[in-house]
Amino acid sequence: MKIGQLSKVSGCSIQTIRYYEKEGLLNVPSRSEGNFRLYDEKSIKELEFVKHCRSLDIPLSDIKALLVLKNKPEESCSSINSLIANQLDLVNKRIRELKTLKSELQIMKKACSSGNTVESCGILTSLNS
Amino acid sequence: MKIGQLSKVSGCSIQTIRYYEKEGLLNVPSRSEGNFRLYDEKSIKELEFVKHCRSLDIPLSDIKALLVLKNKPEESCSSINSLIANQLDLVNKRIRELKTLKSELQIMKKACSSGNTVESCGILTSLNS
DNA sequence: ATAGACTCTATAGTTGCTATAGGATCAAGC
DNA sequence: GCTTGATCCTATAGCAACTATAGAGTCTAT
């Protein structure tokens, strides 16, 4: 299949697929006589692996590391484990940050009784402090 | 005071201060004879306003809009209100997304009983599906 | 006079894409 | 055989919000 087809079945844009290839996250596909990329079932699996990792916000560099590990089946998986643990820490940290943000934004929202002028807006007042 | 001093009292890096100036978020400061930027107390206030907005993840373009509104004290503050409400929506959405992420990552973490080989790693297995 | 601390501008790099320009290829219809 | 439109190709630029670097000028102290 050609790239447009792979894009449809995977839900990744054509540019993104080419970008992943350039970044070394996908095996280099074969080419047709007219220099079009040709993909097969295995390519779909590869792309879906990357997509799944990305849906977990795993950075491309880490996905690359995972792909290397996938090809060393006999090694210890402790680095995979710590990679995921790390990712979890990041997510937890970000959730905590966003919750702090949320409560401050909520307070600000309440401070503005719409219909005010800018001059007396409680939001601007709180942003100034 | 010069930019290094402002950087220290504000906690913003020198490059960030210059960047904010270039983006029109800070008033253009006066210059010394040797072409160094010179700041005063008002500059600190301005920078702190921007910093506070940024700590709420408000994008620079929105901060710019807020600055314009600050100079029209007699206008209605409803656009400030909706800007903040919008920001709150975004934060809430992101929190929900991250919570989904978090639970999937937790499941994956459990799936790996460290000491496994890469081949039998529960994490890789779940990433493949 | 010179060393070192600070500042200046301009430019490139970061991340993970998305969008565009300017072309080549291919299948279908006339 | 020729054209049209859909698809593909590469290379490059743009996004957000910075950070980092190069290469130069300025200021202060000795």
Image (spheres, coloured by chain):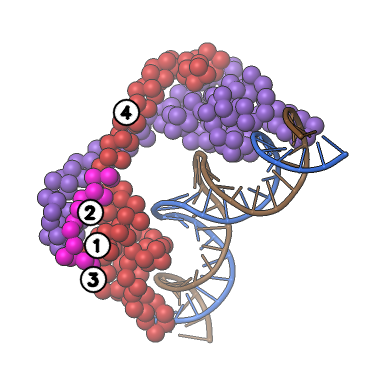
Chain colours: A purple, B red, C brown, D blue
Question: Residue A79: horizontal and vertical position, in percent?
Answer: 49, 26
The answer to whether tags 4 and 2 share a subunit is yes
Pick the front one: A98 or B35: A98
Name the residue tied to disc 2: B80
Q: What is the spatial separation of the Cα atoms under label 3 and label 4, in whole angstroms?
A: 41 Å
In the rendered view, does A116 fall on the left or right side of B11? left
What is the crowding at mark 1: few (fewer than 14 residues within 10 Å), some, or many (at least 20)? some
In the rendered view, does B117 fall on the left or right side of B75? right
Name the residue tied to disc 4: B99
Q: What is the spatial separation of the Cα atoms under label 4 and label 2, in whole angstroms?
A: 29 Å
**For marks 3 and 1 on the same chain, the one whose residue lies earlier in the sequence:** 3
Which span is picked out in magenta?
B71-87
What is the crowding at mark 3: few (fewer than 14 residues within 10 Å), some, or many (at least 20)? few
Q: Which of the two marks, 4 or 1, is nearer to us in this view? A: 1
| Depicted D27 relative to depicted A88: above or below | below
The answer to whether tags 3 and 1 share a subunit is yes
Determine the chain carrying the residue at label 4: B
Pick the front one: C7 or A23: A23
Q: What is the spatial separation of the Cα atoms under label 4 and label 1, in whole angstroms?
A: 35 Å
Callouts 2 and 1 close, C-beta under 8 Å = yes
- The residue positioned 18% from the left and 56% from the top of the image is B77
Q: Which of the two marks, 2 or 3, is nearer to us in this view? A: 2
